[in-house]
Image: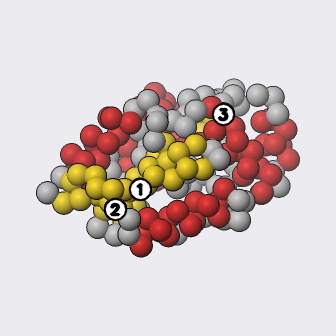
Amino acid sequence: MTQINIQYLSTAFGELIIGSFQGKLCLCDWRFRKMRVQVDSRIKSRLDANYVLETDDLITQTTMQLNEYFKGERQNFDMPILLVGTDFQQRVWQQLQKVAYGETASYLQLAKDLGDVKAIRAVATANGANALSIIVPCHRIIGSDGKLVGYAGGLDSKKRLLSLEANTAGVDGMRESLDLF
């Protein structure tokens, strides 16, 4: 059995678990999320690998890029990633990557962009199963009514991440709508 190198990263937004597999980032997720066991089981099973508390160059690079992001100094990430999930989940996660820094989209919009407006619940479920939080920006997805809904890192972290991006990107409308929460 192969290994997934993991490390923990404490941030002002919460604690993350970062994992790399064969030179690709396969995990950047909230350590204490509700679905921690399910997400970890999916990754370990699909990669036929176990977690080993060990660092490597990719984890170091990811930590550096995340710290830059949290300081408002980075808007995009450029490490190689590995999306570990079903074909549908991967399609949703690829669509998430198109939601630009400082912008938001709704679950309904994601479903429309994927060509099936009726798949809104499946899209929301796939969004919630994302194991590359922040890197694959599931925090940018909000309810159709503009309200913040579900987030593995908690709604407070989601609001703070969106606020960070709005302030850094200078998106006044987004900043104003976030003040409502």
Residue 25 shows in this picture: yes
- On the image, the x and y values in percent for residue 15 come to 53, 45
Going by the numbered disc 1, the residue's amino acid type is Gln
Mark on residue 143?
A: none
Quadrant for the C terminus in the image? top right
Q: How crowded is mark 1: few (under 14 residues within 10 Å), some or many (20 or more)?
A: many
Q: Which of 19 and 113 is in front in this view?
A: 19
Going by the numbered disc 3, the residue's amino acid type is Asp
Going by the numbered disc 2, the residue's amino acid type is Glu
Task: In the displayed orientation, state which residue is furthest to the left.
Answer: 1
- On the image, the x and y values in percent for residue 122 come to 41, 31
Mark on residue 54?
A: 2
Q: Mark 1 points at which residue?
A: 7
Q: Mark 3 points at which residue?
A: 156
User: Relative to 7, is 79 above or below?
Assistant: below
Where disc 2 sits, the SS reads loop
Where disc 1 sits, the SS reads strand
Q: Residue at x 28, y 52 (%)?
A: 51
Report if the CB atoms under discs 1 and 2 are less than 8 Å apart.
Answer: yes
Relative to 87, 131 lies left or right: right
Q: Which residue is drawn at 50% across and 64% down?
A: 62
